[in-house]
Image: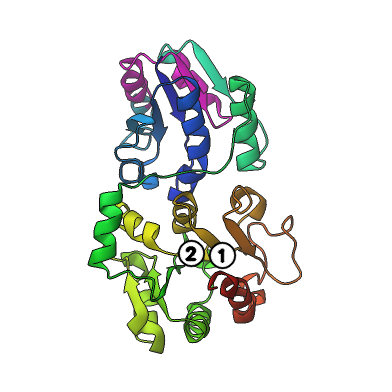
Amino acid sequence: MKVLVIQQRPGIGDLVIFLAFIKKIASKFNSPVSILVKANSRADEILKNDKDIDQIIYLNQKGSYDVLGFFRLVGEIRKRSFDKVFIFNSSPRYRLMAKFAGIKEIHQYPLGRKKDNVITSAKELTEKVLGEKVSTQPTIKVHQKLVDAAKTKYNISKEHKNIVLGISASGEDKRWFVDRFISTSEKLNKLKPCKFYLAAGKNDKPLIDKIISSPIGKNCISFEDLSIGETLPIIKNCDFYLGNDTGFLHLSCALGLKCIAIFFNSPVLSYGTYSTNIACVIPRGETMESTVHDLALGRERISVEDVYNKAKELLN
């Protein structure tokens, strides 16, 4: 049985939250599945050597959105002779792609379906087709040798609380203030000695530099020069995640960490409630239902005390 899963959402976090459904499909058919995803998902790094994944096909290869690119991708899929496809999207483009590729059994959201809860939609489709309940908790496996090597290389010990500090995000409007991250980190470090692993990339260098040059900087190690794959064993060694709704939040969750997630410009019900590992901090005056995209002045209404009070529970 050869199964393809199409997940076209672009980010690392998007890939991670769909892993629960991808892995359940693989388990149901007792065979690894292939996935069609976007390159920004970093699937090759995150799912390297994952026994539930057969092949990774990247959707946004050069020219894949014009007519020639469409049929080039159809040819790539056709030569793999898939029996079934699960399409976590309602666009007719992907249904046509599957039909032209000769896939007989196509499972997809209803065409033209209005946008709704990302997790709920995927769960409903997967459970309907498989006839079984599906957990929404994703998992990522990292080889223990890599975890042990990272522990030694970065001197990660129980003498400190090791915290993944998610200061980055996909846009400025999704980032909590760096000054408030610094203040929160200083307060946590006074409560108990902490080491902070700055989950950010090269594009976030101004944020990283500001934290490194602050008093708490001597307790920080930056991920800026590491690949996503290299960060996974470090994260696995840490005690918990504290930060924005970003790819590192969802990676940390899938690696089994407890997470304090700061939400003010993305829908909590889609990205913050799929796992009991995640505890959300939202703007004062808002509810889980009302915390969505483009929330006016959302980050201003999340104080250092709000985040600190939630995080200090995990220090004990």
Q: Amino acid type of disc 2? A: Phe
Callout 2 touching callout 1 (CB < 8 Å): yes
Q: How is the image coloured?
A: rainbow
| Mark 2 vs 1, N-terminal side | 2
Q: Which residues are magenta?
A: 70-99
Q: Could you say which disc has been placed on residue 260 in the image?
A: 1
Residue appearing at x 59%, y 49% in the figure = 275
User: How far across and how far down the image is residue 288, in percent?
Assistant: 72, 58
Q: Type of residue at label 1? A: Ile
10 Å crowding of disc 1: few (<14), some (14-19), many (20+): many
**Location of the C terminus (image quadrant):** bottom right
* Residue indicated by mark 2: 240
Residue 245 in sight: no
* Neighbours of disc 2 within 10 Å: few (<14), some (14-19), many (20+): many
Label 2 to label 1, Cα distance in Å? 8 Å
The correct choice, above or below, for 297 with respect to 54 in the image is: below
Quadrant location of residue 261? Answer: bottom right
Image height check: is 41 above or below 236?
A: above
Residue 300 placement: quadrant? bottom right
Which secondary structure, mark 2? strand
